[in-house]
Amino acid sequence: MPLASNLLSSNLPFEALPADRQPVIIGARRTPVCRANGALKELRAHQLLAPVLAQLLSDNQVPPETVTDVMIGNAVGGGGNVARLALLEAGLPVSVPGVTVDRQCGSGLDAIVLASRLVAAGGGPVYLAGGVESISTAPLRAHRNDDGDHEFFDRAQFVPHNFGDPDMGVAAENVATRFAITRERQDAFALRSHQRAAAATRSGSFAEEITALETSSGTIRTDDGPRPRLTAGVLKRFPAAFVESGTVTAGNSCFDADAASAVVITSLQRARELGAVDGLLVLATDAAGVEPRLLGIGAAAAAERLLAARGLVATDVGLVEFNEAFASQALACLDHLGIDPLRVNADGGALALGHAYGASGAVLVTRLFAQARRSGEQGRLALAMISIAGGMGTAALLRYERLAAAY
């Protein structure tokens, strides 16, 4: 049964477009993903993002003045348009505008989706798009009461209270209960994520996608989340974290992180002019809403509709990256889509690397770009998907092409 049945889909296919409007990602970068209040705690959001933007321009030989716009997702920052602040910090000229997007955890992926749609609409040839989050330096937030006093709060309200507005951990427990995701499966999924991320770190698989950051403590080059010594026995000892006698624990949940990630999106025609040798063509995107109490299933709703509209099934997709905010929601989504969990997040996911809210969706695309380039398989389909607070999901279908033979 479809999770999202409304007929007004935001699905947008791009393949029939001419080369000057076919969106393609030709470069992708990210910072190390580090635990909040850890190695990157002194860097504000724009300081995380600016080196990534500068590196993308250099890597892909994009003249800064030719950038049409910079579109950046951010969830818990202080406002003020971090996209504009970061692009100027990166050395782009004042003629380049920037816009900041907020769809909470989906913000980074949605910024990439929006930039792709602008290319498809003929809105401009080159965009930088992605996301950033500095949870370590995020401002304190407070409501102003009638008497003028401040009431501090940890998170924004996502939906009206009559819909239910659960905290993320409670929502993950709701999903585990509704879709019968056992504690054993959640722990096994989390352990595999750490094992894969640790192996990828050891092998250097992340090295070429990471832009190192300078801090007062030195140069930060690697993610600090993966735990290579984690075992099933250790995970089994974690108590329920959010609901008494529940199955969702700190061990099978993500941790908060600081990071930035972005991509270069351009038209196929412009990519060739820039000399790009390969890229990820953006084939279609979709976003969907679901029951807010089961917000973790949102990614499945978006991906299900996206694939169905193109006559595809999950097994047609070679590479899948899904944000692992909680093992319960990841497994529920994968079960619904018929995707073997072993096929997802080849180098581990947010359970091991951490969840940098507004950046996480862009990290998914950066990971897919690196994996597709490493495989070199012409025409390989890739899927990025993320569940979002308030009961939503975003998905994007991509295809790896060696551009000289793309069309």
Image (cartoon, helix red, strand yellow):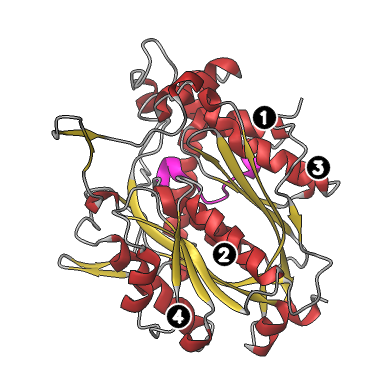
Lower position in the chain sequence, tag 1 or tag 3? 3
Type of amino acid under label 2? Ala
- Give how far apart the Cα atoms at labels 4 and 2 are: 27 Å
Residue 85 in view, yes or no: yes
Q: What label does residue 96 carry, if any?
A: 4
Q: Are marks 4 and 3 in contact (CB under 8 Å)?
A: no
Residue corresponding to mark 1: 335
Lower position in the chain sequence, tag 1 or tag 2? 1
Residue corresponding to mark 2: 370
Answer few, some or many: residues within 10 Å of disc 2's Cα (few below 14, many 20 plus, some between 14 and 19).
some
Q: What label does residue 308 carry, if any?
A: 3
Magenta region: which residues? 342-353
- Give how far apart the Cα atoms at labels 1 and 3 are: 16 Å
Mark 1 vs mark 4: give the one in front: 4
Queried whether the magenta region covers residue 253, the answer comes back as no
Give the left or right position of residue 376, taking residue 264 as reference: right
Type of amino acid under label 1? Asp
Answer few, some or many: residues within 10 Å of disc 1's Cα (few below 14, many 20 plus, some between 14 and 19).
some
Q: Which residue appears at 27% of the width and 48% of the height?
A: 36
Queried whether the magenta region covers residue 351, the answer comes back as yes
- Residue 188's x, y, as percent? 51, 29
Answer few, some or many: residues within 10 Å of disc 3's Cα (few below 14, many 20 plus, some between 14 and 19).
few
Instruction: Please identify the residue farthest to the top as the structure is shown.
Output: 245
- Residue 62's x, y, as percent? 53, 85
The quadrant of the image that shows the C terminus is bottom right
Answer few, some or many: residues within 10 Å of disc 4's Cα (few below 14, many 20 plus, some between 14 and 19).
some
Lower position in the chain sequence, tag 4 or tag 3? 4
